[in-house]
Image: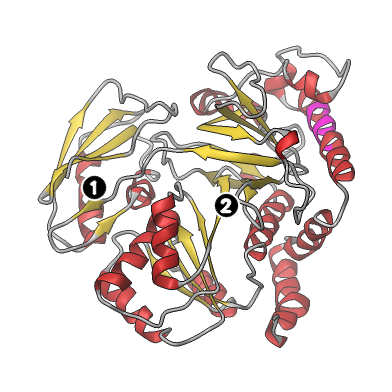
């Protein structure tokens, strides 16, 4: 049940924030809520029109695509899309300036960086309007789990606690825990604060939510209840879902996207992901880039349909996934969007210390993303005393960078951990096509 404060947020505070920030989150949120009430055929038509507009814009106004001489639409936009090359992160880095559309000033765009959980960071740019779309869809995904603006939420994440962040958390009633090292004392203090309380949501990286449940179980802190949990960032394993349900008595709703500004899908009433098709077109292809039939495993390519400042077309994100065949769609479902059957990801291991601290993959990507001198990295743990970091040198590398990274890890962890570095030429990928960030032999 929504509160009076929710009405104040939606009608006064959030619109005021949009006005001050020259954004349009609330306007976009209303539009995306409306899409969920349409018929499947209407949504499909919107998605097709959006794709055609994007591709026409790309070949006419984006230097990178213009010079490829792809030509104009002949048949359907889906067939036309196959003439566009698959875009990988390394290629995007090289051509990024050519991918900014005519009429857009790169310096005035909002930069989006992936966490680098694949070991290679992706960077894109978006306009304020495109950023507003991104944020509105994220709120909508949360709403699918029963959340509403102004509802109390316990959230783990890696965003620094700036004054603006603190104000946002205050207005949105967010208890935020910095998820670098998962300091047990912070978790325990918060668990005691919310003990026996109701009407609370839990949100964060899937592995962090599991750590949260593990700490509650380990410390025997009972009578903690969340209405629902929302996960993102890394794979929500079944063991995580069971653990969260057993400890907190709530279901966990998984979301799927990438930090380059694309919200791909989320779960609601089904055990499948609703693909946000007016926003993103998802292809599943084989290793040669050829489409695979629905129901078969393949690599994920995404095309953001509402990004015109820097079109992201056939972007390879390294995941393996399966689209649900149309003849297997449930007759009754809440939303009119196409369905993704499952996402195949790698098991994100957790680094542990002798004092009981936990470090998930984002603890490291949150540091390495600030060092372009490191092209790629991998964390290996053989025992509780320390870790070895394999790395591939990037542009401008100097050995002092390694000491800076080491100091930042130790400072953030506030625990003893021996850290050694090993330069390598190649970091081998897993079967999903992504390099493994953390490999634990404990």
The residue under the point 76% across, 61% down is 29
The residue under the point 68% across, 85% down is 5
Residue indicated by mark 1: 404
**Cα separation between marks 2 and 1:** 34 Å
Left of 52 or right of it: where is 287?
left
Q: 350 or 249, which is in the foreground?
A: 249
Residue 22 sits inside the magenta stretch: no
Q: x, y percentage for residue 36? A: 80, 55
Of circles 2 and 1, which is in front?
Answer: 2
Check the image and report above or below for 435 versus 365. above
Q: x, y percentage for residue 150? A: 63, 78
The residue under the point 19% across, 44% down is 403
Q: 72 or 309, which is in the foreground?
A: 72
Residue indicated by mark 2: 255
Which stretch is magenta? 50-56
Q: Is residue 109 visible?
A: no
The image quadrant of residue 167 is bottom right
The image quadrant of residue 327 is top right
Helix, strand or loop status at disc 1? helix
Check the image and report above or below for 381 versus 301. below
Q: Which label's residue is closer to the chain start, 2 or 1?
A: 2
């Amino acid at each position: 049940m929504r509160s009076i404060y929710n009405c104040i947020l939606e009608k006064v505070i959030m619109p005021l924030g949009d006005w001050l920030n020259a954004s349009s989150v609330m306007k976009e949120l209303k539009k995306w809520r409306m899409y969920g009430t349409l018929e499947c055929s209407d949504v499909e038509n919107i998605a097709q029109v959006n794709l055609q507009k994007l591709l026409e814009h790309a070949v006419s106004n984006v230097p990178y695509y213009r010079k490829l001489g792809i030509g104009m639409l002949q048949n359907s936009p889906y067939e036309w899309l196959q003439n566009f090359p698959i875009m990988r992160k390394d290629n995007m880095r090289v051509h990024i300036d050519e991918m900014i559309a005519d009429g857009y000033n790169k310096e005035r765009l909002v930069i989006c960086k992936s966490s680098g959980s694949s070991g290679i960071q992706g960077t894109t740019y978006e306009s304020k309007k495109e950023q507003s779309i991104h944020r509105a869809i994220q709120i909508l995904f949360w709403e699918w789990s029963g959340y509403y603006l102004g509802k109390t939420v316990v959230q783990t994440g890696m965003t620094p606690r700036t004054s603006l962040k603190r104000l946002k958390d205050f207005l949105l009633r967010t208890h935020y825990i910095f998820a670098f090292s998962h300091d047990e004392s912070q978790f325990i203090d918060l668990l005691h604060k919310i003990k026996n309380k109701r009407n609370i949501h839990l949100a964060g990286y899937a592995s962090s939510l599991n750590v949260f449940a593990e700490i509650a179980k380990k410390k025997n802190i009972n009578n903690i209840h969340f209405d629902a949990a929302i996960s993102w960032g890394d794979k929500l394993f079944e063991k995580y879902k069971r653990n969260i349900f057993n400890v907190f008595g709530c279901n966990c709703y998984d979301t799927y996207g990438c930090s380059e500004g694309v919200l791909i899908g989320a779960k609601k009433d089904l055990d499948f992901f609703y693909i946000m098709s007016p926003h993103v077109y998802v292809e599943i292809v084989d290793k040669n880039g050829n489409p695979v039939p629905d129901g078969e495993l393949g690599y994920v390519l995404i095309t953001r349909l509402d990004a015109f400042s820097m079109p992201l077309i056939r972007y390879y994100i390294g995941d393996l996934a399966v689209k649900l065949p149309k003849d297997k769609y449930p007759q009754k479902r809440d939303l009119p969007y196409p369905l993704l059957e499952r996402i195949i990801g790698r098991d994100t291991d957790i680094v542990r210390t002798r004092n009981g601290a936990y470090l998930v993959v984002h603890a490291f990507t949150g540091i390495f993303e600030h060092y372009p001198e490191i092209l790629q990295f991998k964390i290996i743990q053989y025992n509780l005393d320390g870790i070895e970091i394999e790395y591939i040198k990037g542009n401008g590398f100097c050995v002092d960078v390694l000491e800076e990274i080491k100091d930042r890890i130790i400072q953030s962890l506030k625990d003893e951990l021996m850290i050694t570095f090993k330069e390598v030429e190649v970091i081998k990928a897993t079967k999903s096509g992504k390099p493994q960030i953390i490999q634990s032999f404990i």
